[in-house]
Amino acid sequence: MPKLKWKNATIVLYSLILLLVLTGCSWPGLSGTGDNTIKIGSQNTTEQQIMANIIQQMIEHDSKYQTTIINNLGSGNVSFEAQKRGDTDLTAIRYTGTDYQTILNLSGGTSSKEINQEVKNDFREKYQMTYFPTYGFADTYQFMVTAKYAKDHNLNTVSDLKRVAGDMRVGIDQIWANRRGDGYSAFKNTYGFGFGKVYPMQIGLVYDALDSGKMDAVLGYSTDGRIASYDLKLLKDDKNFFPPYEASVVVNDQALKKYPKLKTILSRLNGQISLKTMQKLNYQVDNDLLEPSVAAKQFLEKHHYFEGVNDK
């Protein structure tokens, strides 16, 4: 798709998302969904798409429940509002650190354990949503540079960037640019410096921009499979600016009551997906151009999820 058309399509999509949030309307595609269909919410990242398909295929294999995926919810706030309204029954992945700051508007947690527990308690008490145990990985924001750039400038930590920050071109997730709590503004307050030039962009583009030399550093995701293939150096967040981002499925309690087998099915994924496994799954889709549904099916087959449980 030509760049201009892609840009226009993106503008239309985000305008639609904003309209939905403001008006409280249901998400497109739901009008034909039956009352007994489990609605799986998914944001527009590769990781979310893969996990939504894993969940869908497990539910449809292990039960008689029908499912549909509500795709491309633009952010954690949008997917949360959709789930709170009942437009979705669950969100394929929520991240504790993101919800701690942007949904619950909290700050000041002193430990990962404390933050994770507070998020789970508040979601249960305030919103009647159940945070399942983590899948086994955390998708953390990480500043990264090429191995050569790190060696040339002796970079190991985020604080090390201060020496060269004023001359740097840095690509960042467009959502992070204006995010409350753990966004760019808060980052500058914590670390005491900003970058010479900052370029908000789609997260999927930052790795290519760094590899091609168009950027000196980028803010990416720790689970991205391109980190290894591009031999990128991850800089340690030595001031612990970013909270823990444990990844879990979050389900409306009402849905758990309506679909009693759902909890058992989803619990099979507790602690079963490591950071390395998630990087590999993301790589298969982003680099090898596998469809998320195919990557999901191959994962489930390889790890024997289609064996032994089938209540149909």
Image (cartoon, rainbow, N blue to C red):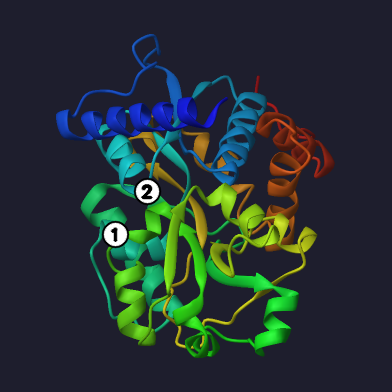
Figure quadrant of residue 218: bottom right
Residue at the extreme left of the image, as rendered: 23
Q: Position of residue 36 (x, y in %)?
A: 42, 17
Element type where label 1 sits in the image: helix
Q: Residue at x 44, y 81 (%)?
A: 166
In the rendered image, residue 124, in percent from the top left (x then y), is placed at: 30, 54
Q: Are marks 2 and 1 in contact (CB under 8 Å)?
A: yes
Nearer to us in this view, 196 or 98? 196
Q: Height in image: 228 above or below 38?
A: below
Quarter of the rendering containing residue 240:
bottom left
Q: Nearer the viewer, residue 229 or 300?
A: 229
Residue at 58 percent of width and 30 percent of height: 56
Quadrant where the C terminus sits is top right
- Near-viewer residue (300 or 263): 300
Q: Residue furthest front?
A: 167
Identify residue for label 2: 76
Q: Is residue 21 above or below residue 76?
A: above
* Amino acid on which disc 1 is placed: Thr
**Tag 1 residue:** 102
Q: Is residue 229 left or right of residue 157?
A: right
How many labels sit on residues?
A: 2
Q: Is residue 70 visible?
A: no
Kindly identify the amino acid type of the residue bearing the numbered disc 2.
Answer: Gly
Nearer to the camera, 197 or 311: 197
Mark earlier in primary sequence (2, 1): 2
Rendered residue at 39%/39% (across/down): 74
Q: Residues within 10 Å of mark 1 (few under 14, many from 20)?
A: some
Residue 17 shows in the view: yes
